[in-house]
Amino acid sequence: GIQVEQSPPDLILQEGANSTLRCNFSDSVNNLQWFHQNPWGQLINLFYIPSGTKQNGRLSATTVATERYSLLYISSSQTTDSGVYFCTRASGSRLTFGEGTQLTVNP
Amino acid sequence: DTGVSQNPRHKITKRGQNVTFRCDPISEHNRLYWYRQTLGQGPEFLTYFQNEAQLEKSRLLSDRFSAERPKGSFSTLEIQRTEQGDSAMYLCASSLFTGGAGGYTFGSGTRLTVV
């Protein structure tokens, strides 16, 4: 099946630090989305970014479809950024999730 | 609209019992999806509806699982004769399909524990 690889699997930051999360695909990047799952389990859609770059506040994402990867940048991290970050690829209407990056931001 | 609502939030059941979960999507969304998430893993697709039609089912959805969306609004997911391996978070999502795959909104999930 199509592989969605995320790195790093775990990341611990001090509040205020910046970070970059990566997502690699074994096949074409198709309708890529980034999600944040907070510690209570709620999945929040961060970006729908099949290509190019988008920014939303302290978060931005870049997808390079020709090289089959996407990056999520978090600047000036806050404790509320803690949780698991997933990238997904759409196959038809189903989303295939990576295994996620567990982010912990310490005060 | 308050987003995607799932009930109950938690369910503990004995092995062999049947359970039913409910999902109320965002009202104008025509697509509704069910996913299952086990500890430490990303969610896995189970099935989806467009309006009342169930258009795709994953092979993960065994014969003990059934999902319905009777009037194209809320959906139910029933698990019969539960097994310990069914313990997981069951997530519902909805979207307004206009040709792309974006715009997913997930509910808070139903956490099932089979004892």
Image (cartoon, rainbow, N blue to C red):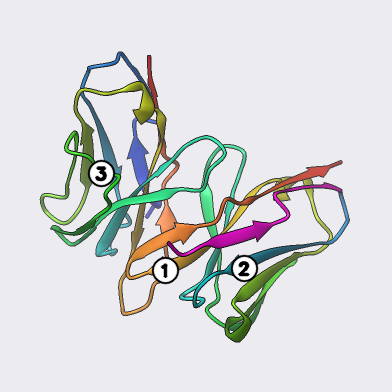
Type of residue at label 2?
A: Asn
First to last magenta residue range: A1-14
Q: Can residue A78 be spotted in the picture?
A: yes
Image point 54% across, 70% down: which residue? A26
The residue type indicated by label 3 comes to: Leu
B99 is within the stretch colored magenta: no
Query: Are both tags, 2 and 1, on one chain?
Result: yes
- Spot occupied by residue A101 in the image (x, y as percentages of width and height): 67, 51
Q: Is residue A29 shown above or below B58?
A: below
Indicate the chain on which mark 3 is placed: B
Name the residue carrying label 2: A24
Chain for mark 1? Answer: A
Q: What residue is drawn where x is 22% and y is 48%? A: B74
Which quadrant holds the N terminus of chain B? bottom left
Q: Which residue is label 1 attached to? A: A90
Of the numbered discs in the image, which one, if any, rests on residue B61?
Answer: 3
| Nearer to us in this view, B75 or B39 | B39
> Quadrant of the rendered structure where residue A66 is?
bottom right
Q: Quadrant of residue A69?
A: bottom right
Give how far across and how far down residue B102 sits, in percent.
43, 71
